[in-house]
Image: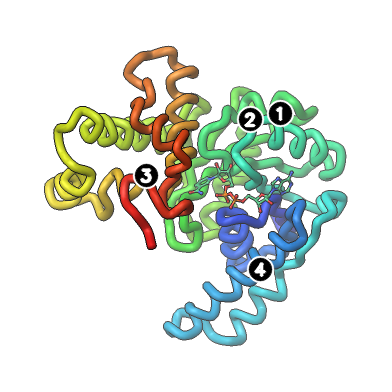
Amino acid sequence: MEVKRVMVIGAGQMGSGIAQVCAQAGYDVIMHDVKEEAAKKGLERINRLLQRNVEKGRMTEEEKTETLQRIALTSDLQEARDADVVIEAVVEDMEVKTKVFQELDNIVPDHGILASNTSSLPITEIAAVTKRPEQVIGMHFMNPVPVMKLVEIIRGLQTSDETYATIREMTNKLNKTPVEVNDFPGFVSNRILMPMINEAIYTVYEGVASPEDVDRVMKLGMNHPMGPLTLADFIGLDTCLSIMEILYEGFGDSKYRPCPLLRKYVKAGWLGKKTGRGFYVYE
Ligand code: NAI
């Protein structure tokens, strides 16, 4: 199937990045958000990032204008009626996502593919609320979307080969590298990353080392560009906890138990950079 029109649902941090890379690749994009204000803010974010590209000589002023002209904003889901591919990037909440998928299923044309950017929720379960589970797939972009090369493509139990092939081709066109992954808790990325972050939190909890020293060991000793606790603060400690809960529940294995210190910080409202305090303090 040839993809021409793409709709992105949710214009937050991830949705706006996805809309940007799709428009840069030449797709006609509709960016949707329940909040009109959020869609406008998303477009402003895209504008700022494109402007920076122009200033750094990575793109011409004309290319920037053309890219922006390919993005339309809406708060009306009915505009999905002409979409070939819809990429959902709303909040990480199963109830909200399944409601969006049920509504989209009734609006999107029969050939349309419904993709989710979820970082941890089961694609198979999201697909099951639609009448087209073979056309539902996970498209897990990394943050920040315009910079990061990877897209984890998650095949639900019923995802068809044709759907997978279309999304793989689209990902290549976005100048990203697709990696095929089956639908199991945490996929590949978070199944490996989150237990490492959780273990880093345990080392602080048990008094083995300070957050600064844990990060120093992983940066200088393992060549990680960012220490695990700095990364956790960036991702958001609430997000880290919810992904650990999904791994713990999904596999029923105690090796995935979330560290009590992580729970304590989340209860205290220390969610990382976004609240000004996590393992570090942010001005
Ligand atoms: P965000 O909070 O920045 O954006 C979510 C947007 O969705 C908000 O603008 C909100 O108004 C909108 N929204 C909420 N309910 C909606 C609905 N029913 N219909 C339309 N729009 C709705 O969140 P973020 O960080 O962009 O995350 C979005 C998704 O991407 C989540 O599933 C998350 O797990 C996933 N993800 C996040 C990553 C990250 O590093 N932040 C990385 C990879 C995936």
Tell me which label, 1 or 2, sits earlier in the chain.
1
98 left or right, relative to 242: right
The residue beneath circle 3 is 232
- How packed mark 4 is, by other alpha carbons closer than 10 Å (few <14, some 14-19, many 20 or more), is many
Camera-side residue of 112 and 197: 197
Looking at numbered disc 2 in the image, what kind of residue is underneath it? Answer: Thr
Q: Residue at x 57, y 63 (%)?
A: 21
The residue beneath circle 2 is 159
Count of numbered marks: 4
Tell me which label, 4 or 1, sits earlier in the chain.
4
Tell me which label, 2 or 3, sits earlier in the chain.
2
The residue beneath circle 4 is 43
Between marks 4 and 1, how big is the CA–CA gap?
A: 31 Å
Q: Residue at x 75, y 39 (%)?
A: 100
Looking at numbered disc 1 in the image, what kind of residue is underneath it? Answer: Pro
Q: How is the image coloured?
A: rainbow
Camera-side residue of 185 and 95: 95
Between marks 3 and 4, how big is the CA–CA gap?
A: 27 Å
Q: Mark 3 and mark 2 in contact (Cβ < 8 Å)?
A: no
The residue beneath circle 1 is 133
Between marks 2 and 3, how big is the CA–CA gap?
A: 32 Å
Camera-side residue of 5 and 117: 117
Between marks 1 and 3, how big is the CA–CA gap?
A: 33 Å
Q: Residue at x 83, y 50 (%)?
A: 77
Element assignment for label 1: helix
Q: Mark 2 and mark 1 in contact (Cβ < 8 Å)?
A: yes
